[in-house]
Amino acid sequence: MQVWKFGDNIDTDAIIPGRFLTINDPAELATHAFEGIRDEFSKQAKKGDIIVAGRNFGCGSSREHAPLALTGAGIQMVIAQSFARIFYRNSINVGLLPVICPRASEISETDQVVPHLDEGYLDVSGKKLPTEPVPEFLRRIIDAGGLVAYAKTIRSEDLCIK
Amino acid sequence: MAGTITEKIFSARCGKEVTAGEVVMAPISGAMIHDITGPLAIEKFYEMGGEKVFDPAKIIMLFDHQVPADSLNAAEIQKNMRIFAKEQGIHNYDIKEGVCHQVTLEKGRVSPGDIVIGSDSHTCMYGAVGAFATGVGSTDMGFALRYGCLYFRVPESIRAHVTGRFQERVGAKDLILTIIKDITVDGATYKAVEFTGDTIESLNMAGRMTCCNMAIEMGGKAGIVPPDQVTKEYLKGRGTWREENLASDPDAVYASWRDYDVSDLVPQVAVPHNVDQVVDVTEIAGTPVDQVFIGSCTNGRFEDLEEAALVLGDKKFSDDVRVLVIPASKTEYLKALRTGLIEQFVEAGALVEAPCCGPCMGGSFGLIASGEVSFSTSNRNFRGRQGSAKGKVYLGSAATAAATAIRGEITDPREVR
């Protein structure tokens, strides 16, 4: 497990530039993740690595290619001080776990991070950093494995049109 | 109970009283998909077991980001989307009408009080007609295409109350950049930004669209202007005007209330690489530029082109600058053509392209190289947004863009006569 540390306001153009948006395959998108911003990411990121960032991660465009590029690179979790709204929801929908940790800046790239999300904290090389709870309705989507899987379980009475 | 305009829209559409913070499943009045995020939305629609969309009459499709198809991939994507539109009976404006948000409003697809989604972050622009409109990702869009509804957390609102009269060559773009500077790039995250005050009331629809369009640049879920006579006038022959008095109650609860006075406002410029890095144009005047882009859903309307043309007069654009003028839609293009603006721009040395997103998202043509500087009337100055990650993008009004294109360096439009 390696931590990839980023700063504040990492936008979706940085995660996956506009010129690659005709690609929809996560693995292929991953080969261009952070291109021009942090070129070694796409070459070295591996399954189970974690992205740690500051405020407003994923701001900008609604492109779902951004969380997909990260899942394609093997990233399963992004820990940030805060997330932009559309990215946060897109991540949950496609099975990338966004974790809000107000003290994320204390995590370094040499740390080992073990999440204990049900208990509300991250074990960061032995130090406990609190995480914010996920709203209940989003929790149901996460537990289902994303919105596509959740949609298949949805009850008709939960829909507002019949 | 007292409510904001946003709470009232959700309450009316959900058929029960809801307040900010509640999570609701709300019916969708309309949905828009385009060539970049549409293909994934369609894929997700099918993965969810969709066969027929919930109501083809409430969905529109169009292509604007990579048009006419600029790669084989884009061509294949557009072909597949055309097939989907035909099979589903969805109106597809294809490549013929222009930038999605401009077209959606022009075609009367949004009315006051609606809840509209688009698989594009600048969907918040539709708040200009008093609707709740927000950008969603492709999977949420796939869900909405299938079920006709979507989960929403009813947002708190920030009230941006604006008073005063603009000075000459200062306008809506300068105002919204000032507001973003104040609220910051994430200060409105998860919130609706409600624009009110006599300045907003006196803004034409183009200016209101510019303001609402950029609500996302402060993290906003929506931007909204309470509908009034200006809205009613705009909707004539387009959308449905609802006579109900749609506005926030006087005692509605806001997350915050911000007051702005534009009387002394000077032209504003967002400098690289965040939209809240905003300065008076005078602070960076003289910065050389390589390309000027006048267009986009933010500022590609006739009013913007007219503003640029007024600054231009019979002058020429600098030989050292590539000037791209791209009207936001066919309708706006024709207005500019019939009033001689297009000829004026071409004579001055601009390249006028057919309505589309152009260089705004750096995914098609008009890209900038490493070390180059773009001055743009669009909405984002992120690193790499218009091409090379080693390039720079500045944002401002059409007037400032025209002045900059004439001198070849960032220029205060009030100085160019």
Image (cartoon, helix red, strand yellow):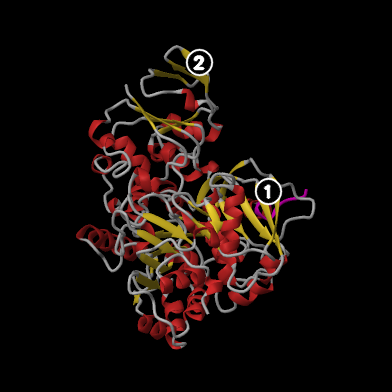
**Residue at (32%, 35%) from the top-left corner?**
A71
| Rendered position, B151 above or below A4 | below
The amino acid sitting under disc 1 is Lys
Q: Determine the residue located farthest toward the right in the rendered image.
A: B251
Q: Nearer the viewer, mark 1 or mark 2?
A: 2
Q: Chain of mark 1?
A: B
Asked which quadrant contains residue B80, the reply is bottom left
Q: Position of residue A158 (x, y in %)?
A: 54, 41
Q: Chain of mark 2?
A: A
Q: Position of residue B6 (x, y in %)?
A: 65, 53
Which residue in the protein does label 2 denote? A128
- Dot 2: element: strand
Q: Nearer the viewer, residue B234 or B377?
A: B377
- Binning the other alpha carbons within 10 Å of mark 1 as few (below 14), some (14 to 19) or many (20 upward) gives few
Q: Determine the residue located farthest toward the front in the rendered image.
A: B286
Which residue in the protein does label 1 denote? B16
Span shown in magenta = B1-7
